[in-house]
Each structure stands twice: as C-alpha cells, then as structure tokens.
Image (cartoon, helix red, strand yellow):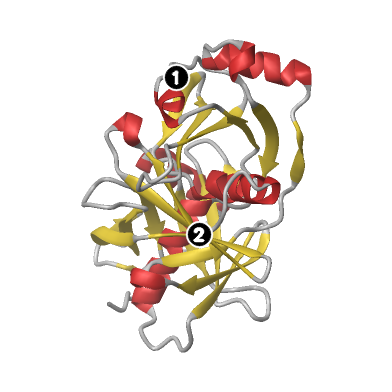
C-alpha cells in the first residue's frame, strides 16, 4: 500500500493519509490502538496536538521526513494532552505503517528519529517488529517516601511492594514489583501524579512470564493503558539486569481491560529488544 502525499481536494480541504493500528494484539481488537498520520510535514505542532486530542487515543503519531542522517523517517508522538519524546507502541505501529508505504525498503532494520534520538527497529520472528530499548533517562530505586505513596495509590499494604524503581525512558515511568500476577490483576488504584507500571510473575510453566499494568493521570482522572511498549522496555532493563527475569520471555498486558496483549522481549549482545504484532485496522484520509 503506497500512500499519496497530503493534498488539497476540490473543496480546498487538505487530506493526510490516516491509519489506525492495533499494536501488541494477539487477536483482532485486543491490543493498543494507535492513530498514525502520514506525510505530516505541513502540520504544525499545534495542529498535531489538536488532532491527538480529537482522536482521543493514548497516542497519535505523525510521520515526517527525517532530519538526521541515517534515519529512515521522523516521528512526533502526542497524547491527547502533550508531546512525548518516545513511546513504545507508537514506535512499533508507526514503523509498521511506514513499511507498508515503502514496500521497497531493503534490509531487516529501520531507523526511527524521534524526540529521544534514533531508535533502531528490526523484523523479528513471526513477522513482529521489535525496537531496541532506548537508554533510561532515570534509573534508580524509588526512595521510601515514594514507595509509601505508591502503595497508598495502588491501595495495597506497604509490605506488598517488593521493589520499586524509576525506569523512565521518556514517559516518566516508576515501576512496582508485586509477588504475583494475581496481585497485579487485583489492583484498584486511585489517580495520582505518577506514571506507574506494575509487574508480577506468573507461576513457572505459564505461557507468560509476567503480568503488567500501566496507570497514568489524564485530565485529573486515572487511565490504564492497554499495552505499553515503553514501560515493558524499562521493566526489561530493570528485571533482566537484576536476574529476576531471563530472556527471552513474553509479558501479558491488558487482561484487566479485556484485552489480550503480548510483549515479546529478547536480549542479544547486550541489547534488549521489545516486540509485538502490529495490524492495520482502519485506513483512510484525515481532512483539515
């Protein structure tokens, strides 16, 4: 599928290729949806923020011509409220969309330019795309005061927080490890100012190594993200680094929302790769 460039129609309205992609899904409509606007160089940052607020998805991305040598494309990533330097499921879904529009792209790797710098993606087993986990911007244990507050926000006893650590690669994640996947699924958190990731293990021999949930504030309310690539990248760097997990492994996320997301994590030559399936569900034209 080759997208036409943005162009004005007979009424003078400008059209931009538009897609909605289901990322990390194991069956139709079970992952995290992403809106992708292509050929978006004519749009201002204000335009992009307005569109992202209108789509009202966790993220909307805008494909642009690269500005850095070696990059295949540039992307800007917006939530309904703000721009992000990096996010995981937008990285996979945007690359998927770009590859569909560039069927002649040679090689198995793609280089994305974003606010966090250059991110390498590659094709992995089963047709999945995977991105190399970017360096953490904040990588340190959460102090006692923060852990007390996290326990309160999550509605659990302080003793249930086995570990907590900042694993921020752009969105601001602080992560909490609980004793089990069941404990993660039982959470009923309240809104806070934190972007919180929670992880707990499944019993040995289960199809998934861990269950993951992600919570963040949106306009004064609590939002749970269905499946979160950036959080899983940060968790992998933390939990592989401590030996709590061993690669390869598969994380489950979205169960509490009735989704069925899977995040595939591998490690090669010191690099951690975070991958999942991306499928286009909607295509069309965004007119402005």
Marks 2 and 1, the one that precedes in the sequence: 1
> Residue, x 65% and y 38% (percent of image)?
172
- Mark 2: few/some/many CA within 10 Å (<14, 14-19, 20+): some
Q: Quadrant of residue 258?
A: top left
Would residue 201 be seen by someone viewing this image from the given angle? yes
Mark 1 lies on residue: 187
State the image coordinates of residue 164 (x, y, percent, origin top left). Answer: 67, 29
Q: In this view, does 129 lie above or below 233?
A: below
Q: In this view, does 251 lie to the left or right of 4?
A: right
Q: Horizontal placement of 220 versus 168: left or right?
A: left
At which x and y percent is residue 114? 61, 61
SS of the residue at dot 2?
loop
Say whether marks 2 and 1 touch (CB < 8 Å): no
The residue at 33%/70% (across/down) is 126
Residue closest to the eye, 21 or 173: 173
Q: Position of residue 283 (x, y in %)?
A: 25, 61
Q: Quadrant of the image for the N terminus?
A: bottom left
Q: In which quarter of the image is the C terminus?
A: bottom left
Kindly report which numbered mark, 2 or 1, lies closer to the viewer in this rendering.
2
Give coordinates of residue 192: x percent, y percent.
Answer: 58, 18
Residue 169 seen: no
Q: Which of 89 and 50 is in front in this view?
A: 89
Residue at the location (53% across, 27% down)? 179
Label 2: which residue? 248
User: In the picture shown, does residue 16 fall above or below 260?
Assistant: below
Report the residue that reaches farthest toward the front. Answer: 204
In whole angstroms, how far apart are the C-alphas of marks 2 and 1?
A: 27 Å
Residue that appears at 55% across and 77% down? 72
Q: Check disc 1 and report its element: helix, strand or loop.
A: loop
Q: Within 10 Å of the Cα at label 1, are there few (<14), some (14-19), or many (20+) other Cα atoms?
A: some
Please identify the quarter of the rendering in which residue 132 is found: bottom right
């Amino acid at each position: 599928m080759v997208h036409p460039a943005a162009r004005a129609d007979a009424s003078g309205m400008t059209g931009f290729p538009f897609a909605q992609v289901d990322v990390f899904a194991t069956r139709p409509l079970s992952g995290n949806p992403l809106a992708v606007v292509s050929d978006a160089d004519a749009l201002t940052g204000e335009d992009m923020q307005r569109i992202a607020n209108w789509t009202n998805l966790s993220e909307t991305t805008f494909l642009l011509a690269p500005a850095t040598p070696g990059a295949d494309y540039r992307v800007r990533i917006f939530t309904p409220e703000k721009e992000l330097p990096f996010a995981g499921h937008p990285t996979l879904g945007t690359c998927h969309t770009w590859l569909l529009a560039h069927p002649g792209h040679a090689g198995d790797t793609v280089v994305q330019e974003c606010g966090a710098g250059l991110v390498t993606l590659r094709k992995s087993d089963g047709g999945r795309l995977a991105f190399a986990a970017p360096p953490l911007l904040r990588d340190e244990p959460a102090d006692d005061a923060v852990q007390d507050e996290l326990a309160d926000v999550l509605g659990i006893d302080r003793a249930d927080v086995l570990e907590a650590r900042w694993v921020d690669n752009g969105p601001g994640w602080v992560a909490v490890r609980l004793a089990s996947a069941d404990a993660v699924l039982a959470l009923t958190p309240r809104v806070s100012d934190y972007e919180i990731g929670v992880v707990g293990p499944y019993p040995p021999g289960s199809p998934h190594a861990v269950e993951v949930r992600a919570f963040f504030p949106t306009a004064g309310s609590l939002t749970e993200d269905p499946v979160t690539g950036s959080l899983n990248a940060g968790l992998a760097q933390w939990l592989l680094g401590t030996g709590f997990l061993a690669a390869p492994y598969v994380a489950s996320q979205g169960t509490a929302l009735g989704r069925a997301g899977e995040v595939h994590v591998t490690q090669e030559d010191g690099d951690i790769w975070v991958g999942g399936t991306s499928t286009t569900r909607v295509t069309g034209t965004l007119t402005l």
